[in-house]
Amino acid sequence: MNRFHIMSVVLHGVVLSAIFISGRAHLQPMPNLEVYRVSLAPLPQPRVISPEQPAEEIHEIIPEEKLEEKVPPKKEEKKVEPAKKPVEKKAVEVVKTGLPDIKPKVYTGSGRGFTYSYYLNILLNRISKNWHNPFRDQDVILKSVIYFEVDKDGNIYGVRLEETSGNEIYNETAMRAVIVTRSLPPLPDEFVDDYLKVHLEFLTAR
Amino acid sequence: MNIFRIFIESSTAAQTIMVILVIFSIWSWGIFLKKLFDFGKVRRSTNRFMANYAFHKEMKEWGNFGIQLTDNPCGRILASGLEEFKRLKVRVSAHLMHQKETPKEHTFINELSDNVRLAMERTKTDEIARLEASLPALSTFVSVSPFLGLLGTVWGIMLAFLEIRARGSAHITIVAPGISDALITTVYGLLVAIPALIFYNIFRSRTNNFSNELDKFISEIYANLRKELLTLSQ
């Protein structure tokens, strides 16, 4: 091994060190986060909402085991059966009418109509991409209405729950879908108002 | 991408191949640096000699080049030509003392003068061989490194498929390690082979150019020495 090979070893060492150091530099230090211990609970099963039933009763979390212990299966079947019929009927209606999961009701700042359907399509696509419906393909009908406004630049603000579905998780996913979307393309140039009011219905459909 | 992490997490076969490739890389860069130094040295000393030779083209002045006759390829070629010429000169002089020159004798001198050219060509061959030393090793790295990388690739893919067969699942966590090994060894192989190929071509081309320069120099010296031999016979 002559001095040139030693030089080559040094050169390789330098290059590999540089790669190693640059690789480490890209790694950002982990932020100091507080750790919360959580115990997993079973996902609350959605129940069918009947118009007479008060909303507060619905998001009561009852562990599955308890349900099994307390309520004998026969009784439960009896209870559920009358409620199921209208649900199935509604779900069929949704399929038949071809309604999407998300349905917007749009109002302009001045109260005039909003005729730019392509913009609404973009709005629906963006938000539905961010929406993870936890009760997809289940025989339940839930409906949340989220209200928000879109300014000229397409920024979403003033997000709030306008109508609860009765299920907190479902409401949260709908709210989250809108909040995560954050911004949309700027409103059409021809649109004269300063902002757009959107009442977005999140509807489970099979 | 952290290459060290990839290396540590690779299989033993892939690690072995990568170590061999790193050794090849160190070796080929060592050859490159050595050759760069050698060629620079040869080029500088030859340029010095040729600058001197341009002003001293007479044969009687050549003996005064001194150390320049030994420190560069052109000088060594000239020295070997001169040595052979002196040997011939003695032989031709002795021959001419006893016999009167005839056309046949003239041919005899021509044939003997070829010995001068051959002596210089032998020296040139030695010089080129010295410059070309280690180039075969570089050529070997060029051809072997991609194949070693390919071996790692095939090995990694084979492992991936064996894992799939053993576990009965083609999940990404089963396939990914083998594929990762497969790809990284190919990358290493190419990283060694590409610079080695560039170095090899650079030095091959420099050697060819230098060989042509030496040929030109030999023909010039040979013409001068042959002329001197013929004047002896007249």
Image: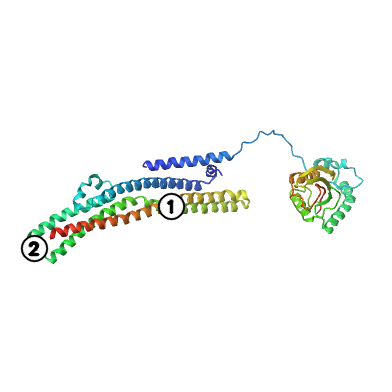
Q: Classify mark 2: helix, strand or loop.
A: loop
Residue A44 shows in the view:
no
Give the chain letter at badge 2.
B
B41 or A71, which is in the foreground? B41
Residue A52 numbered mark, or none: none
Question: First in sequence: mark 2 or mark 1?
Answer: 2
Residue B149 shows in the view:
yes
Residue B36 on image: x %, y %: 38, 47
Q: How crowded is mark 2: few (under 14 residues within 10 Å), some or many (20 or more)?
A: few
Answer with the quarter of the image where residue A96 lies.
bottom right
The Cα atoms of the two marked residues, 2 and 1, are separated by 61 Å
> In the orientation shown, which residue stands out farthest toward the right?
A52
B177 or B212, which is in the foreground? B212
Circle 2 is placed at which residue position?
B100
Q: What is the three-letter code of the residue carrying label 1?
A: Ile
Residue B12 on image: x %, y %: 50, 46
Vertical placement of A31 versus B91: above or below?
A: above
